[in-house]
Amino acid sequence: MSRGFLIVTVIVLALSACSGKTKEELYGEGRTQLQAGNPNGAIVLLKNALEKDQNYLDARYQLALAYKASGKYEQAEKELRKVQRQDPSRRDLQIELARVYALMLKPDQVISEIEGYLKSNAETPETLELMGKAFVQKNRLDRGEELLRKALQADPKRWPPKIALAAVYAQSGRTNDARSLLQDALRLDGKNTQAWHMLARIETSQGNRDKALEAYRRISEIRPEDTEATFKSGLLYLEKGDRDRAAALADGLVTRFPKRPEGYLLKGMTYFHGRDFKRAVVELQKSLKILPDPRTYYYLGLSHYQSRELETALSQFQKVLDVNPSFTPARLMVSLILLNQKRVDDALAESEKVLRQNDKNALAHNIRGSALMAKGRYDEAMAEFDRAIELDPKLTDVHLKKGLYYLGKGMPSQAESELETAVHLSPETLNSRTVLAAHYMKQKNYQKAISTLQQGITGAKTDAVLYNTMAGAYFSQKKAAEGLDSLRKAKAANPDYFAPYMNLAGYYLSRKEYGNALAEYQAILKRNPNDIKALLAIASTLAATGKDGEALDYFRKAANTRQLAGYLALAEYHARKKETGKALSVLDEAIKADPRNAGALEFKGKLLLSQKKYQEAAQSFEALEKTYPDRALPLLVGTYEVMKDTAKAEEAARKIIARNPDSARGYLALASVYSGRNDVDRALETVKRGLDATAGNHEVKFALARLYETKRQYPQALEIYQELQKRNPGNISVAFAEGSLYEKMGSTEKAIGKYRAILEKSETYVPALNNLAYLYADGPESLRRQALRFSARAYRLAPNHHGIMDTYGYALLQNGKSREAAAVLEKSVALLPSNPTVHYHLALAYSAQGNRNKAVASLQRALAAKDFPEAGKARRLLDELGRK
């Protein structure tokens, strides 16, 4: 008889037995089954109890618990909600819902339920723990840690908050604190496998393999069916070089759990590390038949790579990337294989994908540099090697060589080691030597750099790169003669390598020897008439020396190469000359040559915006969106806002969020759209979502504070500003925002203190100069004099800003200079015709001069606005003038 038939028979018999029992009997048996660890049996019994009475709340509550115990969290949530609707007074429901949401990984709902519970109940260790874990899930580690610590203080004997807090410590690099907490948890319960697993991970991360192995051994004793502990032990033995122990563990897993993938995977990895790649492939394929897994595909790819089966290896790595596009080791291997196959452009593209994901990946910069070297693009390659060294000062070329080796060996974490040995092992390798020399130069060890480069001179064309690099070392020591000699040798070694020509020209320009610089650029053009760098360098040099006609000729020659840099340079030249029409024509030509030309489309859109041709600007940015949405969408949001097309602006902002949900940009853009249509509540809601999504991003927090200001919720705004100041005391813009908030709150002395503190750090910070001047302008004579001094300095720094003009004019007036004040305020009114405060200040200036008619006219314009801070004073002045 089949097992399936037996199960069905048992269920049928159970159902038959249920039919004759009372709801109380079914409820009691259901609870017994649940307590005995049989949630599925409990579900059958409790559902039967509810069929007899749908309002039997205790049965429904226990049914929810049974669903939770069986992993059916959504059904558990539904049943708990039903109980809540029927009996809202039950105090335990919100806690139980929070537990379910925690299992569903829904931290916002956990927080909501606990906050609701705490409105009428006191905190408990469990509520603190649930809230703490929820904030950790939201990546709000500081808040999560605070709550978990409180949970432990409330009940030091509870182990779950200890483990949760240990995870926070481990994530933030406080491994000793994490280890201590886990050891406390294990003293309370030595069979806690969750604590043992975390302790093993910590010891592994610290390189304490033996301690990690001991932790995994304890787990296997407690739960022999825990395959992960055995598998991880095998990996540690492989790291120690003990393949025999790893193989024994793999065999044990295969024997005991033949339908689990871990044993075959570990066996395949053991063969791989023993360089038996064919047998590794067999075992890894067995693992994949049970469970397709990116890690297994990765090792299968490595096995084929080591067997020089590059196409097959490439296929396996692509499968990894299909499942997990962000798995960097696989993409680096793809890039390496493509480089080996001389598919240099494809290799470049793959390495660039890694760098777009993480620009700080030193190995990716090294690979990209190697690919650029293969293409003969030496300058760009050198820039990549410089970047690699900047990221990792130890990264000389052994890091490239050994890094690639370790990567191919399936040890990406060890793929960054020192490079100096590579020069001795492979002295003919150009990039090894230049990277090492660049490393020495970063350390200002110029003699060692020069010696390293000189040892690589062989009489080949590639000597040009070495001589050019050597020149940099000489110039850094102010040895100009030796530097010039090295550049000339570089030109002689390879006349078609143009970097030394450009460096010579740069030297001549620094000495204002423009003729010699132009001669170097012309020498490049003799060998390559379309060299864009030389054409643009000549054009810029001629423009800088006032030879606009000749400069324009060279800008046109650069554009005629049909390269983007040429088109953009010519368009920028016309734009600087206020020849917008000509600039747009050049950009149209660039777009016609390449409709996907992002630089031209963006420049065109911005030029059209400056001309207030908003519809055309939007069309340009919409064309840009088709190929470069991340670049286009923020521009579209701003353009649609100016056009008052809030629906399209909102749509574009939502697209930014959808494409980059962890970035602040989209949330800030959407909040700006809502603010623009005075929907502050939705703006506030959006920024709060952004705060959760970006783990407390500084810009988002700042935006939240500004919105609180808009809603006149000043204490909340002030709290955020002060928090941001603690995190970054040097941030002047936040300090200024805090000062201006104090003004709004009527705390003038605190505002003045903030502004003065800002000016001590930066005496040219215009907003602080302006606001401080405005506050001092109504004070006693000594402060009024300071107001004039501060406002005059602000006006010199920002002479065209309408608000600065108003403050300066008002300060002049308050210092008895009514004629000068009127002249400045008239300019401000022209720029701000609808600002009532500026009209009021101008009326004061006219009144001080005895010009009653002009004063009355200005007051009437001001009072047309009805509500503004000085409205009462303006009415009184108008009454006074009317009586005269």
Image (cartoon, grey):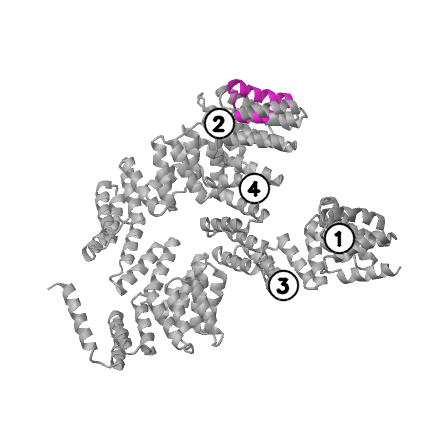
Which residue is nearer to you in this view: 145 or 551? 551
Taking the image as shown, residue 9 lies to the left or right of residue 596, namely left
* Residue 488 image position (x, y, % from top left): 54, 21
Q: CA distance from mark 3 to mark 2?
A: 65 Å
Q: Amino acid at mark 4?
A: Gln
Q: Residues within 10 Å of mark 2 (few under 14, many from 20)?
A: many
Residue 274 within the magenta-colored segment of the rendering? no
Q: CA distance from mark 2 to mark 4?
A: 53 Å
SS at mark 3 in the image: loop
Q: Nearer the viewer, mark 3 or mark 1?
A: 1
Q: Are marks 2 and 1 in contact (CB under 8 Å)?
A: no
Q: Secondary structure at mark 2?
A: helix
Q: Which mark is residue 466?
A: 2
State the mark number for residue 615.
4
Residue at image position (50%, 41%) is 622
In this rendering, position of residue 390 left or right of residue 805: left
Q: Earlier in the sequence, mark 1 or mark 4?
A: 4
Q: Earlier in the sequence, mark 2 or mark 4?
A: 2
Q: Amino acid at mark 3?
A: Arg
- Magenta highlight on residue 520: yes
Residue span colored magenta: 514-538
Q: Nearer the viewer, mark 3 or mark 4?
A: 4
Relative depth, front residue between 531 and 570: 570
Residue at the location (44% across, 44% down)? 357
Distance of label 1 from label 4 (alpha carbons): 33 Å
Work out whether mark 3 precedes mark 1 in sequence or the reverse, and give the earlier one: 3
